[in-house]
Amino acid sequence: MSVGGSTGGRVAVADLAHPRVMVLWCPDWPVVAAAGHHELSLRSPVAVVDKGEVFACSPAARAEGVARGMRRRDAASRCPELAVVDRVPEVEARAFEAVLSSVEDVASGVSPLRPGLCALGVPSRFYGGEREAAAVVAEQLVGVGVWDSRSGVADGLFAAEHAARRAPAQDCWVVEPGGSAAFLGDLPISVLEDHDLVTLLRRLGIRSLGDFASLSPRDVLTRFGHHGARLHRLARGQDGRVASSRRPPVEVQQHVTFDPPLETIEPVVFSTRQTADRCVAELSRHGLVATEVRIEVLGDRGWLGSRVWSHSRWFASSDLVDRLYWQLQADPAPEPVTEVRLCPERVESLGDHGAGLWGSSVDEHVERGIARLQGMLGPEEVLTAAVQGGRSPRARQQTSPWGERGVQPRRVSLPWPGSIPPPAPARVFAEPLPSLVLGVDGRPVQVTDRGQVSAPPATFRAGRGAAQVQVQAWAGPWPIDELWWDPAHARQVARFQLVGVDGSAWLLVVEDGQWWTEARYD
């Protein structure tokens, strides 16, 4: 069948069993988002730079010779008046949220693909046709300041996206039902976003998607694997993906303003109680609870105090008030407070945190007791422990205030050369104990730079003043050269596991000929 362009008669409505897909494309979206964020004009030369190279540029910059992939210095030499801004993906996503919300007002089933590109079901029956529906969407985007949007309609996402890229500004390119393969056949093979596969296909003399589609599916699967077979199906127009509607974000952020500003902690906390109640009630109305909340305190001269709090169960309104009180005590506002914001950072289903039929929920008495201790001693004095990656027992420990998100832990799954094998010791001493390990000749056991033991351990003393114990079994050494590139903090140590004839098991380390006891296996 023929391929429909951006002009011409109306395309028949597709069979409901095979729903059509519309892809909406906003060209140069990184530039559009950055220009709005930095208050720049899109009519002037603008370039968005990522990792020292041009990631996107405005039409005015392209007219001066600036191109994607060009180095920052080369781009500036081509266009001296070029405005260069660093790429911030969060800015692009935040700006595109306004586009998604606007499209959802006139169509359902909006699915964001990436900032600047989204897919949706074609509301052709409601608006009288596919082109008419695309015109309504384009007009809707003009209302939010997006003047260049292009759409494509096809049987699948892949063909619809490339139809959108082929459409003129503020227009729609419609691929007739069943015509995706013919439309895609003329496109260059480079539209497949796989550099290695594209390079290999070009070496084989395949220059277009039509050439790739003409290959046998069995041969493609045998030669290029499942990933190549999936791209082959796309090239043949056999894309069964459809637009799935996203779940619009729930607006649950609550805030309270103070006029006149408040100068002491108690009135701020007391005046925030109803706001905390509203925050929890709004989450509950959507069947959600907050397990992580950011509390922001604003001063009347621009000061901002912000802290993210986590909860082992979920936040009730009293928990939010307590966290605000502790935050203001630990980090007092240097100026009168004008506003407090409660921003849920992580929400989960209420059903996942409800009380179990057989008492499987977290003991509320424990929660209240810990919260009371934090109120008396301060949030930094009640800690919770977690395990992270590391070589020594102390390095594997991570502590953070109870109910607060800790520092991002080191991943346990990473390789840690020189670390001891499991099981981990049960008791890790706050400070290593000076110890002694002797061989059968009564001399201290030494470890060479190559990890060789001078003599098998025969007796040891775990700590100053402890009794000398005969070694029943031992394992090691596990040598490690830590921070060798930093002379001030470099360490060359070796760890041993020792078991005495009395049944006790210990973890010892030797450094510069001195033995220390780090932990005990209870």
Image (tube, rainbow, N blue to C red):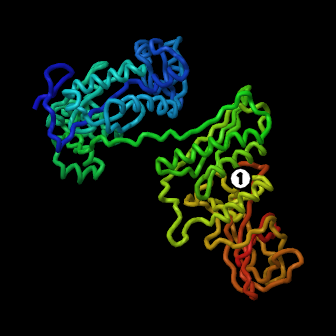
Left/right of residue 135 with respect to residue 258 in the rendered view: left
- Is 445 drawn above or below residue 511 in the view shown? below
**Side (left or right) of 515 relative to 11:** right
The residue at 62%/59% (across/down) is 389
Residue 196 in the image, given as x and y percentages of width and height: 35, 42
The residue labelled by disc 1 is 484
- The quadrant the N terminus occupies is top left
Q: Residue 78 appears at what percent x and percent y?
A: 48, 14
Amino acid type at circle 1 is Trp
Residue 5 x %, y %: 19, 23
Residue at coordinates 61% horizontally, 52% vertically from top-left?
316
The residue most toward the right is 465
Please state which of residues 486 and 338 is positioned toward the viewer in this rendering: 338
Name above or below for residue 512 compared with residue 24. below
Quadrant of the frame with the C terminus? bottom right
Q: Secondary structure at mark 1?
A: loop
Q: How many marks?
A: 1
